[in-house]
């Protein structure tokens, strides 16, 4: 039994328990008085995936937390009926599990990427930020290759073509005005979001519309490139117009106030029924304008923001209608702004400025005086930023639309996983919390944004059949994924052919050494499976790598591809009836496949038998290095099987990981010699033992010899390795520790000299030891470790993912000032936050004392403290509260997605 | 060295935590403590239990129970006190 829940009703109670195969049982206890007379267990229903917790809600719902470690999704189900009341099967009989859910009806599902067995950050879709490709899930609980983007999903509800390329779109319910260069198209919005061209409407269509606003009393105020138009509510009443002398270039409308830019001069106009009057002051050199949103009780906006061509943005206080305006604040920018907007988000009035260089500047406007504070900027992309304030959110349009909104009281920016948009306006659609109408390159789209708050971002899942273990990417966007399940065997397909689902079904057994495995090639862009290679007879794939051999042997399959590029091979290390404790197998081999140039198919080339389980494979200088137990073997390509070239025992116990290490020889090498001599340069490899951490091993093809250059003094059970530079390695281990190791400086020259590998024996008696630069306890086993840049024009950070589905980034801090500030901030936070169960420093030093790593999540909780506590901390650090907040925000937004 | 009272402090600490042992600790006790600590750590850290469960092909709860069951006499029964072990 895996999980249970007790439900108490008025007269009786029952227990719902789940077994390991997902079957739910209803257990009722028969009792008389205080004596228990019997226990009755009946089969209830089957859930896919084992729940880690079950909870029965009084309203008749069952919540099954199947996601997380059991794989699958968290599910909310409704009780359709309470199972067979008559008792179902008698004692001793076996039951037939239901195919789908019968007594329960699914209500909602929350997909969970955990357990993330392997992941990689790649930018296959050529977007601004890399996507995370994560293998997750367990057999029977929706295993999938999930492509995770740090973006919110925008659901496209409708799209239609427009006659020309539209510049702007505005809305004043129920009218939607789409403005083109010289005219405006007016549409009428129905309550379900459908837009229809309207012929009878009060708006002016012979000029480009620059702003649209609804006034109380169903009147409409429209700013066009000719001037202002006040369209009254009563049909047939005359339109009142105010013409501008030189034509209007930008305008903002809110309440009964209009701010128009005519001939470079911004003027404030007050609108009353039947009259438009100008205020005396005008602002020169204005490029773009915005008005603050009107508060519910007021009639006119308080502030006006004007972006000036001298590279500044000014905030003005608007007084009563007719009174002069006064300058409240001025902020200098690096260049003349492209657009300005003001919005109220998370209870704060914020001013947003979009610059032509792609930077979005955000400042907080004081509600009383209009002063600007907490200026933050963020680079969005190589495109001019257009900002548009909608109710409660702000949309910034750069190559990718970003939405600034409030999440749990904090202002957050989220990118949208959607194409570039030219302009947006809010729309009311039934059943959708927040909808937009947008124009993009000559088409009109209606989008629904109701999943802005979801923290996991936009996830596209490609379903697989068994627990995925290993994956490799092909340049064409295909992935080869190894799926395998222990204690399982391929089910006999007695249900007739043609059933694709049953073809890859497995049945669970309890035998220890039976496996079911397959290799699948999927297309990451459309999710289709292009090739499946099923392994029978309890064979499983233990390791996999892509290999390009130095010497190619022409084989008959080569004629099928026309490419001149050296063929890419996929080597699978397979074992038959593999037993984990003690580690042994009946037979082992390497199956070599050729990956076709378009990435869609695998063609079997040959199979090479081995002595021991090939725990790891890597391609090194045109050879395949196989780790078998504690030994490494090097193979070259042969016609009928792989040819063994070298063999050496390098590790004390068992080699589990192999990674190529970059290396540039310091001694002069005559590169003008033939290519075969260049292929004889010594190559470096990172070899990780199962418990003795990582070592740097050099292989020289000339002498077919290995030698261990650098070893570690501390036992580490590594799961992931990554080479950061020539002498530095980052490693993550099974117990949840992250470390960065470096060759000590005095030894770097020694190991770089090319004479080393010829003089040192395989395992030197006095090896160079790694220097541990950083040590940190993350908490869960690490399954991905990769340096990459997470945002456009950002520096690389070390991204790592844990088994339970967390994606984190370790940001290197080069500046001494930053390190001092953050270390002292972390100390202050540790003392302030009394975490009930654990001591923070003890937790982060669970295995090795924490060294040179600051806990960023703890520091960011600074913003959640109360103001007086923050001021105390800031005072002890000799900075202001704003400085610290800005530093934390900058770290997040400059390096990672924030 | 004991002038600062370090010895008494460390003795108290060692007495409180049975895994640390003393001069009279037998090989069997020491090894049993190592096994117990390892199984308890695996059973308490859900991520680590999931890691092992995926390798074994079992559910997380089953693996956790297996770890807890192995904590009963992980190295076999203690040798009789008459035997002297090295």
Image (cartoon, helix red, strand yellow):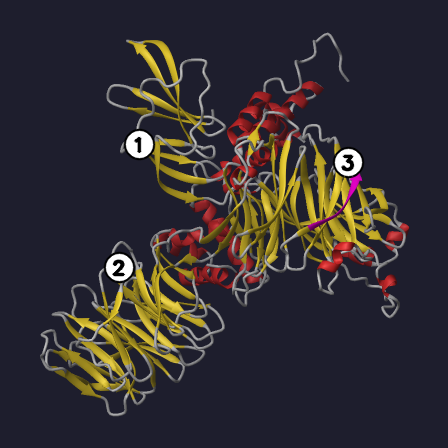
Q: Is residue A606 magenta?
A: yes
- The earlier-in-sequence mark between 1 and 2 is 1
Outermost residue toward the bottom?
A245
Task: Give the residue pinned by disc 1.
Answer: A80
Point out residue A867 in the picture as x, y percentages from the top left corner: 35, 55
Other residues around mark 1 within 10 Å, as few (<14) / some (14–19) / many (≥20): some
Q: Is residue A656 visible?
A: no
The residue located at (62%, 41%) in the rendering is A518
Circle 1 sits in a helix, a strand or a loop, which is it? loop
Q: Chain of mark 3?
A: A
The residue located at (30%, 90%) in the rendering is A263
What's the distance in space between the residues labelled 2 and 3, CA to CA? 64 Å
Label of residue A897 in the image: none
Do discs 1 and 3 belong to a common subunit?
yes
Task: Give the residue pinned by disc 2.
Answer: A429
Q: Is residue A834 magenta?
A: no
Other residues around mark 3 within 10 Å, as few (<14) / some (14–19) / many (≥20): some
Q: Is residue A235 left or right of residue A45?
A: left
Question: Which label sits in the foreground, 1 or 3?
Answer: 1
Q: For the residues labelled 1 and 3, say whether their Cβ atoms are less than 8 Å apart.
A: no
Circle 2 sits in a helix, a strand or a loop, which is it? loop
Most frequent secondary structure within the magenta stretch: strand
Q: Is residue A137 left or right of residue B31?
A: left
Q: Chain of mark 1?
A: A
Q: For the residues labelled 1 and 2, say whether their Cβ atoms are less than 8 Å apart.
A: no
Q: Which residues are magenta?
A: A603-611
Task: Give the residue pinned by disc 3.
Answer: A612
What's the distance in space between the residues labelled 1 and 3, CA to CA? 53 Å
């Amino acid at each position: 039994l895996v999980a249970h829940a007790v439900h108490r009703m008025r007269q009786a109670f029952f227990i719902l328990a789940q077994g390991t195969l997902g079957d739910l049982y209803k257990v009722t206890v028969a009792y008389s008085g205080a004596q228990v007379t019997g226990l009755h267990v009946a089969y209830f229903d089957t859930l896919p995936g084992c729940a880690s917790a079950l909870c029965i809600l009084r309203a008749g719902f069952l919540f099954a937390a199947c996601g997380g470690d059991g794989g699958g999704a968290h599910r909310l189900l409704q009780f359709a009926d309470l199972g067979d009341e008559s008792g179902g099967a008698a004692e001793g009989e076996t039951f037939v599990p239901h195919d789908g859910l019968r007594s329960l009806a699914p209500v909602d599902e929350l997909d969970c990427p955990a357990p993330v067995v392997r992941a990689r950050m790649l930018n296959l879709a050529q977007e601004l930020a890399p996507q995370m490709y994560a293998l997750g899930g367990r057999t029977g609980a929706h295993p999938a290759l999930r492509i995770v983007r740090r973006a919110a999903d925008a659901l496209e509800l409708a799209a239609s073509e427009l006659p020309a390329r539209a510049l702007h779109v505005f809305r004043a319910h129920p009218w939607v005005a789409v403005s083109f260069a010289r005219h405006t198209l007016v549409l009428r919005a129905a309550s379900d979001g459908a837009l229809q061209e309207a012929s009878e409407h009060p708006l002016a269509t012979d000029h480009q519309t620059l702003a649209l606003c609804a006034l109380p009393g169903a009147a409409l105020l429209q700013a066009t490139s000719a001037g202002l138009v006040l369209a009254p509510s009563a049909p047939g009443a005359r339109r009142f117009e105010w013409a501008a002398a030189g034509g209007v270039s930008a305008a903002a409308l809110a309440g009964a106030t209009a701010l128009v830019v005519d001939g470079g001069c911004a003027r404030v106009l007050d609108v009353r029924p039947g009259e438009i009057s100008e205020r005396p002051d005008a602002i020169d050199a204005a490029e773009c304008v915005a008005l603050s949103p009107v508060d519910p009780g007021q009639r006119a906006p308080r502030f006006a923001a004007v972006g000036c061509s001298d590279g500044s943005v000014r905030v003005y206080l608007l007084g009563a209608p007719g009174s002069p305006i006064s300058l409240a604040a001025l902020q200098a920018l690096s260049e003349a702004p492209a657009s300005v907007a003001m919005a109220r988000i998370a209870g704060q009035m914020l001013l947003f400025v979009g610059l032509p260089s792609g930077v979005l500047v955000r400042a907080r406007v004081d509600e009383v005086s209009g002063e600007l504070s907490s200026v933050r900027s963020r680079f969005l992309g190589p495109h001019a930023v257009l900002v548009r304030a909608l109710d409660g959110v702000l949309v910034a349009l750069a190559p990718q639309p970003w939405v600034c909104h409030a999440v749990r009281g904090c202002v957050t920016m989220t990118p949208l996983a959607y194409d570039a948009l030219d302009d947006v306006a809010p729309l009311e659609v039934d059943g959708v919390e927040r909808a937009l109408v947008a124009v993009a390159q000559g088409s009109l789209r209606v989008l629904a944004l109701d999943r802005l708050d979801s923290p996991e971002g936009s996830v596209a899942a490609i379903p697989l059949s068994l627990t995925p273990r290993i994956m490799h990417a092909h340049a064409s966007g295909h992935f080869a994924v190894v799926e395998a399940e222990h204690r399982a065997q391929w089910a006999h397909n007695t249900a007739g052919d043609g059933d694709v689902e049953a073809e890859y079904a497995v049945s669970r057994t309890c035998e220890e050494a039976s496996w079911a495995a397959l290799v699948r090639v999927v297309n990451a862009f459309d999710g289709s499976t292009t090739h499946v290679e099923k392994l029978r007879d309890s064979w499983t794939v233990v390791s996999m790598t892509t290999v390009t051999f130095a010497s190619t042997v022409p084989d008959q399959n080569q004629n099928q591809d026309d490419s001149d590029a050296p063929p890419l091979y996929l080597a699978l290390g397979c074992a038959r009836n593999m037993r984990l404790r003690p580690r042994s197998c009946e037979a082992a081999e390497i199956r070599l496949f050729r990956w076709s140039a378009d990435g869609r198919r695998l063609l079997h080339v040959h199979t090479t038998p081995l002595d021991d389980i090939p725990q790891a494979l890597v391609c090194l200088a045109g050879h395949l290095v196989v780790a078998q137990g504690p030994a490494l073997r090097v193979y070259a390509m042969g016609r009928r099987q792989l040819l063994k070239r070298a063999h050496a025992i390098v590790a004390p116990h068992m080699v589990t990981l192999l990674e190529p290490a970059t290396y540039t020889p310091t001694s002069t090498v005559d590169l003008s010699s033939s290519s075969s001599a260049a292929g004889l340069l010594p190559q470096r490899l990172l070899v990780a033992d199962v418990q003795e951490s990582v070592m740097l091993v050099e292989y020289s093809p000339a002498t077919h010899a290995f030698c261990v250059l650098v070893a570690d003094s501390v036992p580490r059970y590594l799961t992931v390795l990554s080479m950061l530079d020539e002498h530095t390695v980052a490693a993550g281990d099974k117990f949840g520790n992250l470390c960065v190791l470096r060759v000590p400086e005095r030894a770097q020259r020694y190991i770089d000299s090319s004479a080393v590998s010829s003089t040192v024996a395989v395992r030197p008696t006095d090896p160079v030891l790694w220097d541990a630069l950083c040590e940190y306890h993350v908490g869960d086993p690490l399954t991905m470790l990769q340096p990459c840049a997470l945002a456009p024009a950002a520096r690389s950070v070390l991204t790592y993912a844990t088994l339970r589905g967390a994606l984190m980034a370790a940001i290197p801090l080069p500046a001494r000032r930053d390190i001092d500030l953050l270390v002292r901030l972390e100390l202050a936070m540790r003392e302030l936050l009394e975490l009930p169960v654990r001591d923070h420093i003890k937790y982060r030093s669970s295995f090795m004392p924490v060294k040179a790593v600051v806990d960023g999540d703890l520091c960011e909780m600074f913003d959640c403290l109360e103001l007086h506590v923050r001021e105390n901390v800031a005072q002890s650090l000799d900075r202001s509260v704003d400085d610290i907040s800005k530093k934390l925000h900058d770290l997040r937004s400059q390096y990672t997605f924030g | 060295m004991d002038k600062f009272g370090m010895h008494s402090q460390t003795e108290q600490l060692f007495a409180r935590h049975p895994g640390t042992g003393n001069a009279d600790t037998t090989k069997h006790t020491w090894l049993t403590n190592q096994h117990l600590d390892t199984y308890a750590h695996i059973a308490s850290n859900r991520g680590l239990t999931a890691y092992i469960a995926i390798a074994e092909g079992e559910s997380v709860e089953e693996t956790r129970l297996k770890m807890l069951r192995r904590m009963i006499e992980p190295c076999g029964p203690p040798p009789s006190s008459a035997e002297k072990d090295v």
